[in-house]
Image (spheres, rainbow, N blue to C red):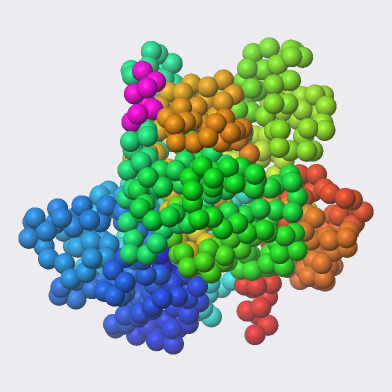
């Protein structure tokens, strides 16, 4: 895994500033500490920082083709590069390296932009075509690896992280109010929006071709689900067929993700998904597999007993790191620097600290279980929507809403609530079952309450804007014909997964310490096949990921196979108020003067929130998210805008 960046002065022949390229590559040094390189010719410059994983000696970038007319900077992995190289060798092509970057370059030279359809991998890359005077950029299907870009005064700049683009002091810096409103609704901006005005993110499954005159954005991949009427008829295959085919695809996805010239480890959280991934990896690794996990001070978040069960079952060499509340508070600012966007949960911070421990243990590639919940219906939100639809058929029932009490056994604040509270919260909108966002409205309704903190002028700027309307305009034409579970899965897979889980909790945190995550459940073959699995095999009554549990039960102990889903979470508000007193940086970042300087939030509202934090043992979900969201936004402003304006 690596960091890439570049500049093209499209409207002039003026050369690219070499000092600027050096600063850009330095800004990305944490992503690739093993090597770096710069290519500069006339009005184009490309730079690269390398995390060496395949062909350690010959994979230097930027890399060029035989005649020097094509230059590439590549971030990611192409897992089927061996097979693609063999196919091209049969056509007479020769290779100088064993690395996948050269395969990408030669595939582009052979078939152009269609090369992305051939890749099984996670990637973001840019290819400068000297003959055609174009820059071709691409991002993987589900958005594992990031790519950002901007146009400014005839110049096109791009980078794996926004901070590389901001090394050019001429690029304006401003918090995007509409992106902030999206974060305070969905937890993330909707691409191409980012946290900053006029800084764009290349959406997952898209390519971008930059010409002198214009930019051409093209979607090459979008998850597709069969119509609901097709899934409600008799299954075309017996359940065992789906089990066998899913396991076969998943096993191969794990196998090819073990391809590396360095040791590959695995995360073992104690949950079902990482257990499946580690168990499959264990079958393909002759040496003892190294696994890694985090645990917490508070029992509500800790999963060490389940981690220990899997360690004993697999016989792996396990490393467990205890993440204290103090550590989360101490490193929150660092996580925002790497995330480059507001966040409303502290969960990214322990993931960043885990990556640090992994790297210190001598591992820089890990398999993880991300994606299983999205493609195989594992989240509580799917069960919640199913209960609400069942309830909606008899909205006056007093028995049906009681099913909601079974959904969140791991949440102490939910367990203490009566059925009247649950009915009042989840009962809103029961008559709107045809709403395409029916499954997600309750979640978004909680997050939207954070907007009560907005400053008056921000409210005025956002007047008449609804981020949900913007999302609705981007839904596939046949979305309304899909099964309700498929609709909910699509929203998780296309939006929350790349927008938050794979970015703020994934790439940005692991690459902060030069650790590459690999995701077998997000192999595009697994994603495509899982979409065809009948919904009742994914969510059987209220048993999430039923088909996966049945397909892999011979690999795992019963305690793991039958464990109810417990999402990864971390302590939130309490980490900022040890002994009921705010950390000094919390008081400073949320002080009236700091709030007035950023101009994003209302001073009175923030003061009221701080007062609430000071006098309570713990906050509710809404107030906790409001605290983290406000604090992270203030840090974003201070780190990227205020600091620039004062230096």
Vertical placement of residue 187 versus 137, above or below: above
Question: Where's residue 548, x and y in %?
Answer: 46, 31
From this viewpoint, is residue 130 visible? no
Question: How many discs appear?
Answer: 0
Q: Quadrant of the N terminus?
A: bottom left
95 drawn magenta = no
Find residue 413 and report its horizontal and vertical position in percent. 79, 38
Along the line of sight, the residue nearer the viewer: 152 or 149: 149
Residue at the image position 52 percent from the left and 66 percent from the top: 361
In reply to whether residue 240 is colored magenta, the answer given is yes
Q: Nearer the viewer, residue 538 or 560?
A: 560
Q: Residue furthest right?
A: 615
Say which of 469 and 126 sits in front. Answer: 126
Which residue is painted at 89% across and 59% down in the image? 580
Vertical side of 495 occupied by 245: above or below: above
Q: Residue at x 18, y 71 (%)?
A: 96
Residue 278 appears anywhere in the view: yes
Q: Residue 394, located in which quarter of the rendered image?
A: top right
579 with respect to 404 (left or right) = right
Q: Position of residue 58 (x, y in %)?
A: 26, 74
Position of 367 relative to 432 (above/below): below
Q: Residue at x 7, y 60 (%)?
A: 92
Q: Which quarter of the rendered picture does the C terminus lie within?
A: bottom right
Residue 257, how many percent across, how many down? 36, 52
Q: Which residues are magenta?
A: 238-245
The secondary structure that most of the magenta stretch takes on is: helix
């Amino acid at each position: 895994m690596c960091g890439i960046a570049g500049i093209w002065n499209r409207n002039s022949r003026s050369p690219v500033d070499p000092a600027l390229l050096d600063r850009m590559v330095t800004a990305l040094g944490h992503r690739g500490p093993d090597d770096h390189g710069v290519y500069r010719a006339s009005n184009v410059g490309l730079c690269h920082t390398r995390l060496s994983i395949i062909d350690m000696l010959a994979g230097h970038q930027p890399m060029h083709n035989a005649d020097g007319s094509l230059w590439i900077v590549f971030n990611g992995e192409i897992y089927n590069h061996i097979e693609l190289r063999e196919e091209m060798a049969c056509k007479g092509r020769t290779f100088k390296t064993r690395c996948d970057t050269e395969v990408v370059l030669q595939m582009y030279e052979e078939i152009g932009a269609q090369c992305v359809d051939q890749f099984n991998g996670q990637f973001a890359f840019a290819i400068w075509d000297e003959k055609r005077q174009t820059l071709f950029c691409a991002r993987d299907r589900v958005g594992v690896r990031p790519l950002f870009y901007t146009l400014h005064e005839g110049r096109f700049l791009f980078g794996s992280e926004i901070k590389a683009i901001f090394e050019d002091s001429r690029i304006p810096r401003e918090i995007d109010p509409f992106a902030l409103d999206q974060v305070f609704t969905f937890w993330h901006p909707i691409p191409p929006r980012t946290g900053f005005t006029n800084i764009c993110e290349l959406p997952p499954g898209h390519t971008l071709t930059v010409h002198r005159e214009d930019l051409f954005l093209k979607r090459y991949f979008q998850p597709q689900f069969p119509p609901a009427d097709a899934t409600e008829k008799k299954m075309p295959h017996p359940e065992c067929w789906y089990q066998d085919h899913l396991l076969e695809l998943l096993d191969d996805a794990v196998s090819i993700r073990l391809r590396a010239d360095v040791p590959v480890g695995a995360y073992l959280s104690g949950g079902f998904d990482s257990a499946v991934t580690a168990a499959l990896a264990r079958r393909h690794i002759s040496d003892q597999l190294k696994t890694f996990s985090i645990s917490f001070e508070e029992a509500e978040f800790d999963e060490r007993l389940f981690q220990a069960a899997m360690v004993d079952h697999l016989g792996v060499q396990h490393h467990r790191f205890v993440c204290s509340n103090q550590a989360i508070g101490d490193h929150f600012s660092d996580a925002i620097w790497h995330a480059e966007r507001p966040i409303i949960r502290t969960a990214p911070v322990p993931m960043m600290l885990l990556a640090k421990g992994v790297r210190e243990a001598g591992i820089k590639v890990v398999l993880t279980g991300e994606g299983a919940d999205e493609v195989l219906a594992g989240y509580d939100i799917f069960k919640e929507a199913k209960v609400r639809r069942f309830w909606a058929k008899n909205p006056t029932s007093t028995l049906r809403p009681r099913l909601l009490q079974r959904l969140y056994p791991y949440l102490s604040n939910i367990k203490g609530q009566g059925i009247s509270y649950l009915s009042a919260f989840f009962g809103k909108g029961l008559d709107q079952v045809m709403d395409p966002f029916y499954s997600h409205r309750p979640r978004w309704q909680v997050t939207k309450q954070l907007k009560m903190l907005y400053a008056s002028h921000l409210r005025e700027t956002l007047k008449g804007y609804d981020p949900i309307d913007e999302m609705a305009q981007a839904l596939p034409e046949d979305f309304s014909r899909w099964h309700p579970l498929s609709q909910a899965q699509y929203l998780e897979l296309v939006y929350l997964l790349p927008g938050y889980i794979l970015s703020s909790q994934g790439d940005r945190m692991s690459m902060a310490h030069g650790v590459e995550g690999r995701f077998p459940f997000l192999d595009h073959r697994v994603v495509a096949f899982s979409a065809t699995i009948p919904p009742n095999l994914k969510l059987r009554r209220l048993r999430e990921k039923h088909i996966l549990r049945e397909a892999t039960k011979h690999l795992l102990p019963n305690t793991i196979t039958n464990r109810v889903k417990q999402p990864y979470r971390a302590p939130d508000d309490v980490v900022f108020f040890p002994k009921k007193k705010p950390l000094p940086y919390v008081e400073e970042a949320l002080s009236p003067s700091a709030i007035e300087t950023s101009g994003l939030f209302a001073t009175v509202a923030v003061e009221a929130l701080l007062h609430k934090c000071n006098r309570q043992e713990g906050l509710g979900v809404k107030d906790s998210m409001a605290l983290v969201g406000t604090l992270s936004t203030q840090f974003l402003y201070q780190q990227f805008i205020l600091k620039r304006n004062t230096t």
